[in-house]
Amino acid sequence: MSSYEFPFNERIRTYLRLEDLFTKVLHHVNVGHEFNHHAALISILQMLDIIDRADLKMDLLQELERQKSHLQHLRGNPNIAEEALNTTIASLEKSALALRGDTLKLGQALRENDWLMSIKQRANIPGGVCEFDLPSYHHWLYLGEERRRKDFETWLSRLMPMHQAIQTILQILRGSGELIKHVARQGAFQQLLGGVRPAQLLRIEVEDSPCFPEVSANKYAINIRFNSLDFVQKPKQCDHDVEFAMVICNF
């Protein structure tokens, strides 16, 4: 089973990018090898670039409050599991409290670390973090796994509230729609969009198929084209029907 997600707006796109980077960071930190810790640090520095582009903290706080207000209105609804509802509301409150607990702008403590910023500057240059470029960085890599883990723990503690907030919001968004089976005739599928709430995220699941989806969309319609992978030429549209499942998520 292959699963794909396609955001419909820049806000959700930002959340997904940060989620992806954080997943990689946690994986590489857990593995522990110096090469993995290098990859983890580069991903953290990439997160800082994304965070810098907007007032992400305020955006997250507003979205957490909006979701909390919406869910509170569902209390007493016989069709809603009360325990699950209360758990989700508690997660929203916990995420908002953690974000407010740091008075600094997201990532500011890391941006004020001159040593990290020197690595970030060199990391933007292909091959720019060699020993002769950043001897202090390679000294850090040689200090051992335990020391590096402690440093990562310190750095990630300033970003973890953001990660938890994004995870909570995306969990609600991903659970907002119903997975429906479709068939893309000759690899092509189109669906018109309607409803009061605009689509925020498209999720596609494909089982045992050599094809992968590419999506183009606007506020009126979704167009999906399934392509076959060619490792030399550009991907070509599949010439056979493709069965897939799709859910349009919004909140």
Image (spheres, helix red, strand yellow):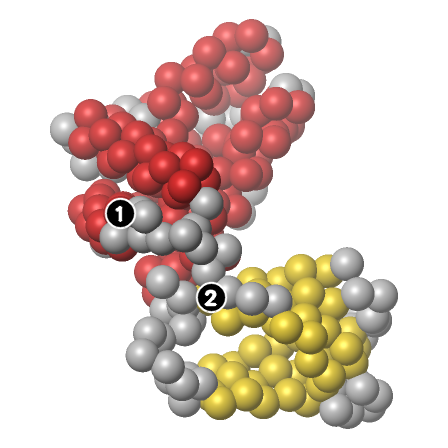
Q: Nearer the observer, disc 1 or disc 2?
A: 1
> Residue 92's spot in the image, x, y percent?
32, 39
Q: CA distance from mark 1 to mark 2?
A: 20 Å
The quarter holding residue 46 reads: top left
Quarter of the picture containing the N terminus is bottom right
Q: State which tag comes first along the sequence, 1 or 2.
A: 1
In the rendered view, tell whether residue 64 sits above or below residue 45.
Answer: below
Q: Nearer the viewer, residue 205 or 31?
A: 205
* Residue 161 at least partly seen: yes
- Does 131 sit above or below residue 188? above
Which of 47/249 is in front?
249
Mark 1 sits on what residue? 72
Quick one: SS at disc 1?
A: helix
Residue wearing tag 2: 249
* Residue found 62% across the figure and 76% down from its top: 214
Neighbour class for label 2 at 10 Å: few (<14), some, many (≥20)?
A: many
Q: Residue at x 83, y 70 (%)?
A: 209
Q: Amino acid at mark 1?
A: Gln
Coordinates of residue 123 in the picture (x, y in percent): 46, 40
Whether 150 is drawn above or below 93: the answer is: above
